[in-house]
Image (spheres, grey):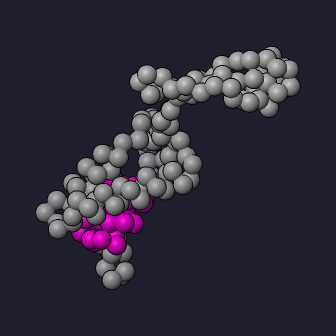
């Protein structure tokens, strides 16, 4: 912790106390260079991961949106909720491992598509066609050919 008096980065903690509600830790410190005493406070801050959407706007990352999208794509297909949660876990793990606080929605969509492709071809086709906004029958035929050729 940088001393507010001399700027030195070396100090020792004299006292540590937790707040009554347990959300803040107060530390009394002493600079090892000039002897100045000062107080710091620590709080847990959940890093908010943001998602940049195709149209350019940014919104908070919501795991529930991934789960809902997969559930819609796999309606009437025997995919367990456990598998759906596993895919959401993979997406979250990717974001955390990359250390990103801003992730493109296309990255999330790509991961979900790849995992669905391994799990169920029909769910993959449904998800991809909605996610990529497929509105042309030729594009849909290309997806079907891709799936058929990878079997």
Give the image quarter of residue 136: bottom left
Numbered circles on residues, count:
0
Q: Is residue 115 above or below residue 60?
A: below
Q: Main secondary structure of the magenta part?
A: helix
Residue 46: x %, y % from top left: 48, 36
Residue 42: x %, y % from top left: 57, 28
60, 6: nearer the viewer: 6
39, 73: nearer the viewer: 39
Give the image quarter of residue 148: bottom left
What residue do we see at 17% from left, 68% from top?
78
Q: Is residue 5 left or right of residue 97?
A: right
16, 39: nearer the viewer: 16
Residue 110: x %, y % from top left: 42, 59
What residue do we see at 28% from left, 64% from top?
83
Name, please, the residue furthest toward the front.
14
| Residue segment shown in magenta | 107-134
Q: Is residue 113 left or right of residue 67?
A: right
Dividing the image into 4 quarters, which one contains the C terminus?
bottom left
Dividing the image into 4 quarters, which one contains the N terminus?
top right
Residue 3: x %, y % from top left: 77, 23
Q: Is residue 35 magenta?
A: no
Name, please, the residue furthest toward the left.
76
What residue do we see at 46% from left, 55% from top?
93
What residue do we see at 26% from left, 61% from top?
82
């Amino acid at each position: 912790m940088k001393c507010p008096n001399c700027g030195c980065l070396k100090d020792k903690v004299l006292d540590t106390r937790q707040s009554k509600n347990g959300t803040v830790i107060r530390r009394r410190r002493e600079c090892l260079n000039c002897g100045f005493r000062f107080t710091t406070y620590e709080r847990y801050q959940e890093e908010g991961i943001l998602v940049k959407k195709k149209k350019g706007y940014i919104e908070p990352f919501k795991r529930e949106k991934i789960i809902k999208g997969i559930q819609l794509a796999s309606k009437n297909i025997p995919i367990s909720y456990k598998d759906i949660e596993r895919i959401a876990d993979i997406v979250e793990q990717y974001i955390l491992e990359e250390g990103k606080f801003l992730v493109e929605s296309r990255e999330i969509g790509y991961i979900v598509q790849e995992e669905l492709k391994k799990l169920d071809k029909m769910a993959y086709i449904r998800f991809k066609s909605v996610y990529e906004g497929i509105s042309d029958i030729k594009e849909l035929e290309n997806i079907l050919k891709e799936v058929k050729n990878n079997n």
